[in-house]
Amino acid sequence: MMFQGEEVKKDFPILNQVVNDEPLIYLDSAATSQKPTAVLTAIETYYKTSNANVHRGVHTLAERATSQYEAARETVRAFIHAKETAEVLFTRGATTSLNWVAKSYGEANVHEGDEIVISYMEHHSNIVPWQQLAKKNKAILKYIELTKDGQLDLTSAKEQITTKTKIVALTHVSNVLGSVNPIAELTQLAHSVGAVMVVDGAQAVPHMAVDVVELGVDFYAFSGHKMLGPTGIGILYGKRALLEVMEPVEYGGEMIDFVYDQDSTWTELPWKFEAGTPNIAGAIGLAASIDYLNQLGMENIHAHETALVTYLLPKLRAIPGLVVYGPTDDASRTGVITFNVDELHPHDLATALDMQGIAVRAGHHCTQPLMRQLGASSTARASVYVYNTKADCDSLVEAILATKEFFNYGLN
Amino acid sequence: MALTRLDQLYRQVILDHSSHPHHHGTLEEATNQVEMNNPTCGDVIELQLNLTDNRIEAIRFSGSGCTISTASASMMTDVVLGKTPKEALALVDQFSLLVQGKEPENLDDLGDAAILSGVAKFPARIRCATLAWKGLEKALATPDETKTNEKE
């Protein structure tokens, strides 16, 4: 059953506050989401009742911590429909996940003259690791072009992905344009030339049902903090056959099988990659956030966000001088809206909105190559999530109008 | 509160400088120049100056920026023109104190830039205000063309 943003908002204590003497309206969930009481309670309860190191002790708390940590892994597995928990690695976040793939799989499999294909809509975290890998191994980094309305150009994808391509790394959902890429189709394309498909799902998993097996991807990365979970926890999904032959990126406790004087052997998946004491509370918090999302229902969440953006976009476009970037088919977009207003600099706009209690992002959104494609040095971005309402959208529109008024005539 | 507090940040004189910046453009020949990049917003300011007889004889800036960074650059060029590098660097220090909410010794020396004291109440915007001033510092330190990033 569909939920109401007004009701959901009550589960998020942080949203019930006043900033700059105005009620807070949080429209920056694409940067990080807020956390419901259920997640905060799960973390607090863990520290109050079960805190211990995992996979080490034989005492009761150690057993509790271990079973909760591994139960969290199973919760994640079920959420993304992976075949087995051994394919679900806990990381620090999507950035770490992507770096691991570049460092481990990439350095071993990409050689001089090979190609790595990414696109112009990638976040820096899905550009820089590949750029550095290409530099190190003398490979070639290629970019898939975008269409005029900010979608991945599939003709360009077919041109860029060749028999020399070893890795295709693409975002599932753009953090700027709100466009959704056809990952299943692109994965087939990558596989047809023998390349592996790496997907940055940081902006997808929080907002839509994701099935990694159905998509066919080889690696899939996402972050807990964008999906109502805590910061410092993320996931790297990888196909078992690939993870089995990959070298760990970090070495230390927990990941070893046996340590000799001069060499060591690694333990089995998934722990082979998880050196050191992991973010146990983070994993438990992430599982609680997934439980919360499942209660709302991913289909309902997607429908809720579509309802909000199809309500908000026409109102924004009606503001004189306001330009919205990205796909023109509003119903195909996610809850991310990037825009500019006339000559108003996004930083000035964001400060003015903050004075009216509204949190938006301003800047290049960690996508400098995309900003160059859009011909903008920076933009403003409003992003909605489960706790946003049509009233929030109305407030944003009113606040932008008031800001325009202020900068045009407002100073006395 | 709405937008009333914004007046502290965006006084009319700031908006005047931002919409009609002084010394905006490029010099045909420059003895010192830098490109300053604010990586959080992508703003880039290029600053050029001509040092003759140990004085800033000409100064120009160009590039894109928000109201605060453009106005601050404009005010900076006004106040350092004709100064020696030593005098100009002293003003950079004074301005840095000002936007941190501290009381500079010689507020009047900063000219119109003194009005940017309101920025201190908006910590997220301090770097917008200081970009051009840091550029001046870099330009005076490095006569050759350099490209520098203002790091996080």
Image (cartoon, rainbow, N blue to C red):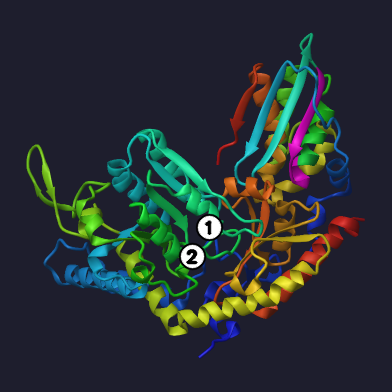
Q: Nearer the viewer, mark 1 or mark 2?
A: 1
Answer yes or no: is residue A92 visible. no
Other-residue count near label 2 (Cα within 10 Å), few / some / many at <14 / 14–19 / ≥20: few
Q: Is residue B66 magenta?
A: yes
Task: Check if mark 1 and mark 2 are on a common chain.
Answer: yes
| Residue A241: quadrant of the picture | bottom left
Quadrant containing the C terminus of chain A is: bottom right
Identify the magenta region: B57-69
Q: Secondary structure at mark 2?
A: loop
The answer to whether residue B33 is above or below residue A17 is: above
Task: Report the residue at 42% width, 47% height from top.
Answer: A162
Q: Amino acid at mark 1?
A: Leu
Q: Position of residue B73 (x, y in %)?
A: 77, 35
Q: Secondary structure at mark 1?
A: helix
Comparing B122 with A177, the one in front is A177
Q: Position of residue A58 (x, y in %)?
A: 11, 67
Residue lying at the far left in this picture: please name it. Answer: A260
Other-residue count near label 1 (Cα within 10 Å), few / some / many at <14 / 14–19 / ≥20: some
Which badge, 1 or 2, is on the more N-terminal residue?
1
Task: Tell me if label 1 and label 2 are in contact, CB under 8 Å.
Answer: yes
Task: Report the residue at 66% width, 50% height from top.
Answer: A374
Task: Report the residue at 78% width, 51% height from top.
Answer: B9
The chain containing the residue under callout 2 comes to A
Type of secondary structure dominating the magenta stretch: strand
Question: Which residue is labeled 1 in the image?
Answer: A154
Q: Amino acid at mark 2?
A: Pro
Q: Position of residue A222 (x, y in %)?
A: 41, 61
Comparing B2 with A275, the one in front is A275
The chain containing the residue under callout 1 comes to A
Question: Which residue is labeled 2 in the image?
Answer: A182
Comparing A358 with A153, the one in front is A153
Task: Report the residue at 41% width, 52% height from top.
Answer: A168
